[in-house]
Image (cartoon, grey):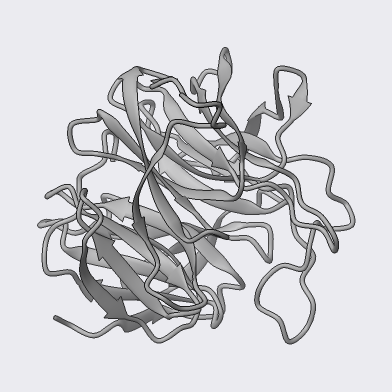
């Protein structure tokens, strides 16, 4: 297996990489409130100056990019992670970014009269709707609950599927589209939700807040789960905080491999290239984008 090569640096707190057809990678920079584009030669330019806290990113059925904006975080010198909400924070949002101009248009800021707290990651199903997670904002002595939602890209419908949820982060769909995977940061658990219809998850039982079943957890250590990507074979690659690894799970929860990366805070991974084996990994403690060849191909997403 190849080692990680650093493609770009100086990216603030990078997240949400999307491998584009032209070989570039569009990602998010939460710390600086923008979405950079990294060219194949490592040149960095600004694709969209969104403001707030751009986090998860995905290509939708119309070719536009859809963004989970967490509303912004407060950063202090010497710490790579955000230290609670930004002083100007009001709420989180879902935004549409024009593929040519990067112009941002806000689609959702609330659901059922409740503000979105910190939308984190999203994935489109083949019908053109998208599931997204809301991590919830963390304060000095308390935190917002997180949740899982489903929405349409035209701004006409948003539904809460699971609430409260401790700290839902990365999300992805199984190759057959019948399972939604959600990684929880604080508990370092990987959940699987059965999908009954687009935007409809299996009902809960026994009074639990959600119907997700635990299919994987972090190895015995102080770790947290961040974002994830599903592989073509159905395995799930989870960016694992503090261990500095990408942990690949089988759908049954077995750890298939752990791949060390040169950063204690790998936050996200996506796949691209002609054979879908080129893995782009956001290395957020150092503010870098890394690239390597993965042993098996990633799953080609529905609209990218």
Foreground pick, 13 / 222: 222
- Expressed as whole percent of the image width and height from the top left, the position of residue 164 reads 64, 36
- Along the horizontal axis of the image, is 95 left or right of 84? left
Foreground pick, 183 / 113: 183
Q: Which quadrant would the C terminus be assigned to in this image?
A: top left
Residue shown at 50% from the left, 26% from the top: 206
Q: How many marks?
A: 0
- Expressed as whole percent of the image width and height from the top left, the position of residue 123 reads 40, 38
- Expressed as whole percent of the image width and height from the top left, the position of residue 25 reads 38, 59
Foreground pick, 292 / 23: 292
Q: Which quadrant would the N terminus be assigned to in this image?
A: bottom left
Q: Is residue 202 above or below residue 148?
A: above
Residue 4 occupies quadrant: bottom left
- Along the horizontal axis of the image, is 144 left or right of 280? right
Q: Is residue 278 above or below residue 143?
A: below
Q: Is residue 67 above or below residue 290?
A: above
Q: Is residue 98 visible?
A: no
Q: Is residue 49 visible?
A: yes
- Along the horizontal axis of the image, is 238 left or right of 283? left
- Along the horizontal axis of the image, is 40 left or right of 206? left
Residue sticking out furthest to the right: 87
- Expressed as whole percent of the image width and height from the top left, the position of residue 82 reads 71, 67
Residue shown at 46% from the left, 24% from the top: 205
Residue shown at 25% from the left, 55% from the top: 253
Residue shown at 26% from the left, 75% from the top: 258
């Amino acid at each position: 297996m190849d080692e990680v090569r650093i493609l770009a640096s100086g990216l603030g707190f990078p997240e949400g990489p999307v491998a584009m057809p032209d070989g570039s990678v569009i990602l998010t920079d939460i710390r600086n409130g923008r979405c950079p584009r990294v060219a194949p030669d490592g040149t960095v330019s600004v694709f969209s100056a969104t403001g707030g806290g751009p986090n998860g990113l995905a290509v939708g059925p119309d070719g536009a990019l859809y963004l989970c904006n967490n509303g912004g975080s407060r950063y202090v010198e010497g710490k790579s992670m955000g230290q609670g909400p930004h002083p100007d924070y009001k709420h989180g949002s879902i935004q549409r970014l024009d593929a040519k101009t990067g112009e941002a248009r806000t689609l959702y800021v609330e659901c059922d009269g409740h503000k979105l707290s910190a939308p984190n990651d999203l994935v489109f199903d083949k019908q053109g709707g998208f599931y997204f997670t809301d991590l919830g904002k963390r304060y000095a002595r308390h935190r917002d609950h997180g949740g899982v939602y489903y929405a349409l890209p035209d701004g006409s419908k948003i539904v809460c599927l699971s609430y409260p949820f401790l700290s839902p982060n990365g999300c992805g769909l199984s190759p057959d589209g019948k399972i939604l995977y959600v990684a929880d940061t604080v508990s370092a658990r990987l959940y699987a939700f059965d999908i009954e219809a687009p935007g409809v998850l299996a009902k809960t039982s026994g009074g639990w807040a959600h119907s997700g079943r635990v299919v994987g957890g972090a190895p015995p250590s102080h770790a947290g789960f961040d974002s994830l990507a599903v592989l073509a074979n159905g395995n799930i690659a989870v960016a694992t905080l503090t261990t500095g690894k990408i942990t690949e799970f089988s759908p049954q929860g077995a750890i298939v491999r752990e791949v060390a990366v040169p950063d204690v805070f790998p936050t996200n991974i996506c796949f691209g290239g002609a054979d879908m084996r080129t893995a782009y990994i956001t290395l957020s403690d150092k503010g870098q984008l890394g690239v390597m060849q993965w042993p098996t191909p990633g799953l080609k997403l529905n609209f990218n």
